[in-house]
Amino acid sequence: MRLVLLGGGGFRTPLIFRALLQRRDEVDVDELVLFDLSPDRLTVIAAVLDGMAVGVRRPPRVRLTTDLDDALTGADVVFAAIRVGGTQGRVRDERRALELGVLGQETVGAGGLTYGLRTLPVMLEIAERIGALAPYAWVLNFTNPAGMITEALRELLGDRVIGICDSPIGLVRRACRALDVPESAATVDYVGINHLGWLRSLQLDGTDLLPSLLADEAGLAGIEEGRLFGAELLQGLRAIPNEYLYFYYAQRDLVAELATGRTRGEVVADSQRAFYRAFTDAGPVEPAAALAAWSETRMSRERSYLAEARGADERDQQDLSGGGYEHVALDLMAALAGGPARTLIVNSRNGSAVPQLPPELVLEVPATVTSDGVGPLPVARPLDLHQLGLIASVRAAERTLIDAVRHRSSATARLAFEQHPLIGSPRIAAALVDSTVADHPQLGSILR
């Protein structure tokens, strides 16, 4: 199997490689192609991979390229994890939104839409090249905002595009640990869109155990979501929200707090800049040193994940060391490659899983994955009005932004920002669109 990583010089690439080394019996990748626009970043990450491969029998062959067509030709699986504008783009997104009085988190609200605005044109061009050079490849999308980008790519590549995220499975694992239930034995009802969903039931042998967890305030205090949202909100919702919903439930408090402190983007940008610079300025890269530095930087980064919402709370140790999105990707690849069918929470076409929403909408729900693709499972019960309304309003704004890029309309882009429930201001919408275009002049030739 030839696996292509778009954004292969990115900081998380070694996580995918480590999972490949650990799970060669399930997913036999012969060649791993790393594509990135930065040859320096590729060189540093390749050294980290070399450090990981020491002592491993038959590690995948790693090839580096800055030529997109070269990377895509002959691909069996394309894993997309690019960051248009780099970490500095995220810093600008988050800080500018806060200066305008709205949330600017990377994938949520103003930050998510500005990130999507500059990313959509690039990803749509990449999708065209995939269609021409690797039409039968599976495309696993981790490029943020993952739900919006996955929905846009589907218009060109259809059902062979699947979006992945580790937030839902992290929530399920924490709930299973709190209930002392084996994850493999649980049947879950999770529904939403990327970074906006709820765990609504967790069944073992036909009995829903989630109500007992919601009634147990001490048990809720033992999981991140319980500490983050508080028992009263979870009990009122009769569900456990994805951690990113904190940006909706506490938006006013967070805007005030973040405006005076460092954003997550600033923290990540500083740590990653220091990591890459330490090696790109030092001549030949020694694999062991690169691996040690990457591991230390990764742990620091993981500890600060969603720190703007968690405050002083430490992340659960299992979330620092356990499998994340890389294992979701490997689970998906194993099933698509002909391994045993798996039930995974992924981003794919709704179909009839949630009859209240359009069939073409991309949802994040449990699905059966086989070599034939993804089949979303029907939700256990209809969405309540709160869930339905929030999903519909956020995805409506995202779909409007996709239309803006596709139809090259700056007016439609402003409308998308105006529609989002975390913005709600024509003045702020126009300022965000105009500043994003100013930062990325190529958008000026796209939006008219």
Image (cartoon, grey):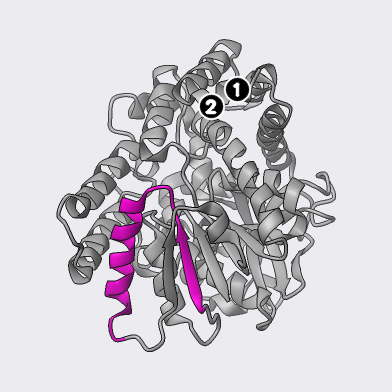
As shown in the figure, which amino acid type bears the numbered disc 1? Ser
Residue 414, compared with residue 128, is above or below; it is above
Specify few, some or many for label 2: CA neighbours under 10 Å numbering under 14, 14-19, or 20 or more.
few
Left or right placement of residue 109 versus residue 65 in this view = right
- Residue 442's label in the rendered image is 2
Q: Does dot 2 land on a helix, a strand or a loop? A: helix
Specify start and end residues of the magenta stretch as a single range.
Answer: 30-55
Q: Which picture quadrant has residue 411?
A: top right
Name the image quarter holding the C terminus. Answer: top right
As shown in the figure, which amino acid type bears the numbered disc 2? Gln
User: Which of 144/32 is in front?
Assistant: 32
Q: Does the magenta stretch include residue 35?
A: yes
Q: Which picture quadrant has residue 365?
A: bottom right
Which residue is under mark 1? 445
Q: Position of residue 258 (x, y in %)?
A: 35, 29
Q: Does dot 1 land on a helix, a strand or a loop? A: helix
The CA distance from mark 2 to mark 1 is: 6 Å
> At x 29% / y 25%, what residue is drawn?
260
Q: Where is residue 108 in the image (x, y as percent from the top left)?
A: 52, 37
